[in-house]
Image (cartoon, helix red, strand yellow):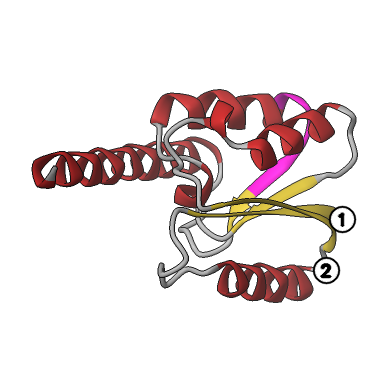
Amino acid sequence: MIGVEYIRHSTDDQPNSRQNQKNIIRDYATRKGIKIVNSYEDLGISGGAVSKRPGLMQLLLDAEKKQFEMVLFYKYDRAFRNLEEQVVVLKKLKALGIKYVGVTDPEGDGASGELILNILGAVNQFERELTEEWYRDWE
């Protein structure tokens, strides 16, 4: 299977650093027999809006060109901190026949898998909104 990885972090001092994400994704890919052919990165960028992340936008353009069969995320929260955008993007990938996985997130198939993704998406959005509130309170 031909895959790509997506890496994002908001700040350099996060524990899920660029290199840590890459190492975990590549270990997963090796174990599953997935050949990583490209890496898309958005470093120092919030996960709040897909449109503000050139790496993810390029990944989506390349997905439309069928340049790969699978997207590997360290965790879904690295790609999505907005539930609505998560649903739209993953639905688009699915329609293109592209698989996706958050390599450190729980997995599930069918209705269970969709439920897990939606719960993760809601929690990820909640965490982003809490962080925004915290920063607003400190201004």
- In this picture, residue 101 sits left or right of residue 87: right
Is tag 2's residue or tag 1's residue first in the polypeptide sequence?
1
- Residue at 47% x, 59% y is 105
Where does the N terminus fall, quadrant-wise?
Answer: bottom right
Q: Amino acid at mark 1?
A: Met
Q: Disc 2 marks which residue?
A: 33
- Residue at 52% x, 69% y is 17
**How many labels, in total?**
2
- Start-end of magenta stretch: 95-100
What is the x, y in percent for residue 126? Answer: 25, 40
Up-down relation of residue 130 to residue 75 (above or below): above
Q: Amino acid at mark 2?
A: Gly
- Residue at 46% x, 58% y is 106
Which element is circle 1 on?
loop
- In this picture, residue 125 sits left or right of residue 116: left
Residue 37, quarter of picture: bottom right
Q: Nearer the viewer, residue 23 or 105?
A: 23
Q: Is residue 58 magenta-colored? A: no
Up-down relation of residue 125 to residue 34 (above or below): above
Residues at circles 2 and 1 in contact by the CB criterion of under 8 Å? yes
Q: CA distance from mark 2 to mark 1?
A: 7 Å
What is the x, y in percent for residue 109? Answer: 56, 45
- Residue at 72% x, 71% y is 26
What is the x, y in percent for residue 136? Answer: 16, 39
Q: Nearer the viewer, residue 77 or 29?
A: 77
Where does the C terminus fall, quadrant-wise?
Answer: top left
Q: Disc 1 marks which residue?
A: 1
| Mark 2: few/some/many CA within 10 Å (<14, 14-19, 20+) | few
